[in-house]
Image (spheres, grey):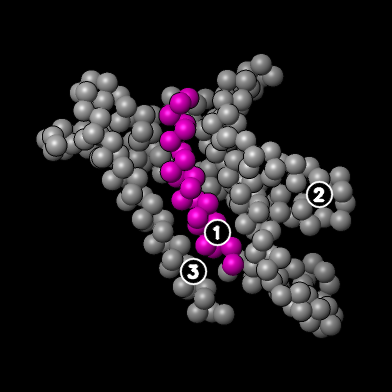
């Protein structure tokens, strides 16, 4: 193994890893917003609100994220949507992960004991007050790990943005491979950086999960 090569290109790979983190964080935040709205819509009593949310979840979970990204970036200009690679990557990943976040949030809310709702109503709380003061705080604890798993999946899946020329970690590794012809060393180095990022996220999720578990 050419350790000298790894040391030489490491600063460039590290800089690209920061781009991967940047794309992932923005996508996760967007996904949480979209997922929360979609999950809320799924509980609506109005079918014209509920069914579009269900279609969104089914479509974006049932089709490849890469195809979705290509539709947005390469197909978008046909309908007047022109996005820079970074913006397209963040929006594409955010919309995709939002469908998974939606199911994680919805599942956590459903998992809260229905007796809690009845108890809240018996205390004179309205429907929205029950949701805000009783259901959501308890569901939030149950959402941590599923959302953490989704976030880790997005970080590893963010590699697809390299296909639209976002200069992230995998894209940078490929560029060096084309000039050095040493894929083993470069992919090992890129994998190590991905592992560090995922390990940090896993650590944060574990600590949050433990923290909220102690409050139960």
- Residue bearing the label numbered 2: 50
First to last magenta residue range: 142-164
Which corner quadrant holds the C terminus? bottom right
Q: Quadrant of residue 40?
A: bottom right
User: Which callout, 3 or 1, points to the residue nearer the camera?
Assistant: 1
Q: Which mark is residue 209?
A: 3
Identify which residue is drawn at 25% across, 40% down. Answer: 189
Residue 25 is one of the magenta-drawn residues:
no
Badge 3 local density, few (<14 within 10 Å), some, or many (20+)? some
Q: Locate the N terminus by quadrant.
A: top left
Q: Residues within 10 Å of mark 2 (few under 14, many from 20)?
A: some
From the viewer's perspective, is 52 left or right of 28? right
Q: Is residue 85 above or below residue 102?
A: above
The mark that comes first in sequence, 3 or 2, is 2
Please state if 16 lies on the left or on the right of 2 as rendered: right
Query: Which mark is drawn over residue 146?
Result: 1
> Is residue 161 located in the magenta-colored stretch of the structure?
yes
Asked if residue 155 shows in the view, the reply is yes
Residue at (64% x, 46% y) in the render:
99
Residue 30 rendering spot, x and y as whole percentages = 58, 45
Q: Earlier in the sequence, mark 3 or mark 1?
A: 1
Residue 99 bears which disc, if any?
A: none
The Cα atoms of the two marked residues, 3 and 2, are separated by: 30 Å
Q: Main secondary structure of the magenta part?
A: helix
Q: Quadrant of residue 105?
A: bottom right
Mark 1 vs mark 2, CA separation in Å: 22 Å
Badge 1: how crowded within 10 Å, few (<14), some, or many (20+)?
A: some
Is there a contact, CB below 8 Å, between mark 3 and mark 2? no
Hey, which residue is sitting farthest top in the picture?
A: 78
């Amino acid at each position: 193994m050419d350790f000298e090569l790894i040391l030489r290109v490491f600063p460039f790979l590290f800089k690209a890893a920061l781009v991967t983190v940047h794309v992932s964080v923005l996508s996760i935040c967007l996904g949480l917003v979209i997922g929360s709205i979609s999950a809320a819509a799924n509980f609506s009593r109005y079918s014209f609100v509920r069914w579009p949310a269900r279609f969104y979840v089914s479509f974006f979970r049932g089709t490849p994220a890469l195809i979705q990204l290509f539709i947005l970036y390469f197909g978008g200009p046909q309908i007047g949507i022109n996005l820079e690679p970074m913006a397209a990557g963040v929006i594409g990943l955010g919309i995709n992960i939002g469908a998974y976040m939606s199911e994680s949030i919805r599942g956590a809310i459903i998992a809260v004991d229905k007796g809690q709702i009845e108890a809240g109503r018996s205390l004179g709380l309205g429907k929205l007050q029950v949701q805000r003061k009783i259901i959501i705080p308890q569901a939030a604890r149950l959402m941590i790990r599923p959302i953490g798993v989704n976030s880790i999946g997005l970080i590893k899946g963010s590699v697809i943005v390299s296909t639209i020329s976002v200069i992230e970690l995998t894209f940078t590794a490929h560029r060096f491979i084309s000039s050095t012809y040493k894929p083993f060393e470069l992919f090992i180095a890129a994998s190590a950086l991905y592992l560090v990022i995922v390990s940090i996220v896993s650590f944060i999720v574990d600590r949050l999960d433990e923290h909220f578990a102690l409050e139960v």
